[in-house]
Amino acid sequence: MKFIIAIIQPHRIDAVREALTEVGVEGLTVSEVRGYGRQRGHKEVYRGAEYTITYVPKLKLEVAVESEKADEVVEAISRAARTGKIGDGKIFMLELQAAMRIRTGEMGSQAL
Amino acid sequence: MINGADTAWMLTASVLVLFMTLPGLALFYAGLVRAKNILSVLMHCVAVACLVSFLWFAGAYSLAFVGSNPWIGDLSQAFLAGVERGAVHPATTIPDTVYIMFQMTFAIITPGLIIGAYVERIKFSAVLLFSGLWLIVVYAPVAHWVWGGGWLATLGVKDYAGGIVVHTTAGISALIVAIALGKREGFPHHVHPPHAPWIVMVGAAMLWVGWFGFNAGSALTSGADAGMAMLVTHLAAAVATLTWMAIEWARFGKPSLVGSVTGTIAGLATVTPASGFIGPYGAVIIGVVSGCICYSAVQIVKLRYFVDDSLDVFAVHGIGGMTGTLLTAILMPIVLGGVGFADNVTLQSQLGVQAVGVIAAAVWSAGMSYALIKITELLVGVRVVPDFETQGLDLSTHGESGYNVAFGGSTQ
């Protein structure tokens, strides 16, 4: 099993969710996060003064999938989240050692 | 004799002006600070409003509006002694009680405006002590000079609703307090932007509506003067908003909400002294001029002189109030729709008198505010410790958080 973490532009979330549904992903965790990458934040203007917003709002997606589906899922996320502009985000993939569905106690890929 | 229509309007106007502070000004300021200080700013507005109300009763009203000395009133109506239910306020058609209440709401918002200069770093005890002293030492005398039959009134100064009494005194004092108190940690290059621009707009809109009570209420009657004052107040606010919006749009490519509603307040503050003396053309001119001048003042105070007048009280209210007081003389002529000048008064002589009024109020406010903030520092201290400032005043001073969205606690 693989654990996929994606940091995306908040306004791409609907497109990403649809793309994940199309490739059969049935569960998703989303959190509102802030951070910066190479673009080093952005500028906002209030009352004529420019403020550097170092930590830009992003969404963090976490998805657990079976190993053979992982590449397809990463491809789906990247396709849906990409705008081609700076700040589109990142996708990380980790080995997932175990999973359990709390209600039933099912383990492994049964729990996904 | 008491007139029912006038009294009804003045009761309404008093409600509107209190609404400017609670919650209008409170929200306007609360949205501009960081999330960790929202409650402290709201608390400052509530506490100052209540403290001033009590002091108004205790003696400040009497010092401002009772007695014939040119410099300061007397204490003959301290604790509102001798104020009777049926008494008519001299030279008006409304009850004494309504006049006292109406003027009280002005006294409340004036030290309230200064809050914007010292947010996010001041001790709560210093807010109370400074505001109380300031009401007695700055507001009461200046209100007496201009509106209580004092020396500026004798001189013929025209200040319809508080360009001098409210906005010059508060604006100048804000600048002095900001300098004396010092900058917030990180100012000017590492301060955070307003945490909730939408709250700023809500507060500004409440101020806008409340301002009709402020300016049209200053007619003290419900007739033609109140009508024109309301019209010019609204026009100036609308044009100033468009002006500020246009400046930001041209300069930064995007018209911002926070900037636009700051323009609204600049227009309202600037039209305040003129509102009973000008016509619609004058209002449009005030709108354009106030938008341009106050916008520039914000940049100069913060980015050239690096004074952390955190919420731009001096640049918006001080500069606006002073500019409006001078413009009053220029926009009064009948050809511009104004009320014209009295016999033996010319535009130049009126302008001179207006300048004397502005300078006198500014000098008094600056000197006294400096003295009062030093006294406050000596007695209770003025700044919170750096740890408290970093943590935010909500938690460190008031023991509360503005936003408890998830992971709520439980009671014992």
Image (cartoon, grey):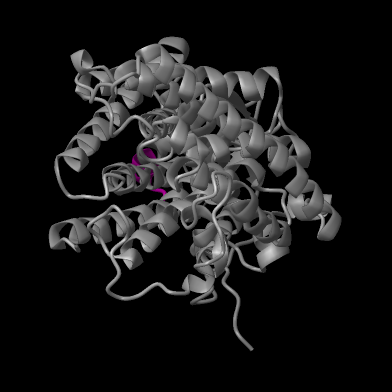
- Percent of width and height locating residue B73: 54, 54
Residues B95 and B317: in front is: B95
Residue furthest toward the right?
Answer: B378
Residue at the (58%, 26%) spot, across then down:
B359
**Residue A38 appears in view:** no
Residue at the (27%, 24%) spot, across then down:
B283
Residue at the (31%, 30%) spot, across then down:
B237
Q: Is residue B318 rendered magenta in the image?
A: no
Image: B141 above or below B74:
above
Please give left or right for residue B97 compared with residue A73 in the image.
Answer: left
- Percent of width and height locating residue B161: 37, 40
- Percent of width and height locating residue A106: 53, 71
Image: B44 above or below B156:
below
Please give left or right for residue A77 compared with residue B363 in the image.
Answer: left
Say which quarter of the image contains residue B52.
bottom right
In magenta, the rendered stretch is A17-26
Residues B87 and B190: in front is: B87
Please give left or right for residue B27 compared with residue B370 in the image.
Answer: left
Q: In this figure, what is the number of numbered marks?
A: 0
Residue at the (66%, 20%) spot, across then down:
B303
- Percent of width and height locating residue A64: 54, 52
Residues B335 and B353: in front is: B353
**Residue B357 appears in view:** yes
Residues B189 and B21: in front is: B21
Q: Main secondary structure of the magenta part?
A: helix
Residue furthest toward the bottom?
Answer: B412
Image: B403 above or below A92:
below
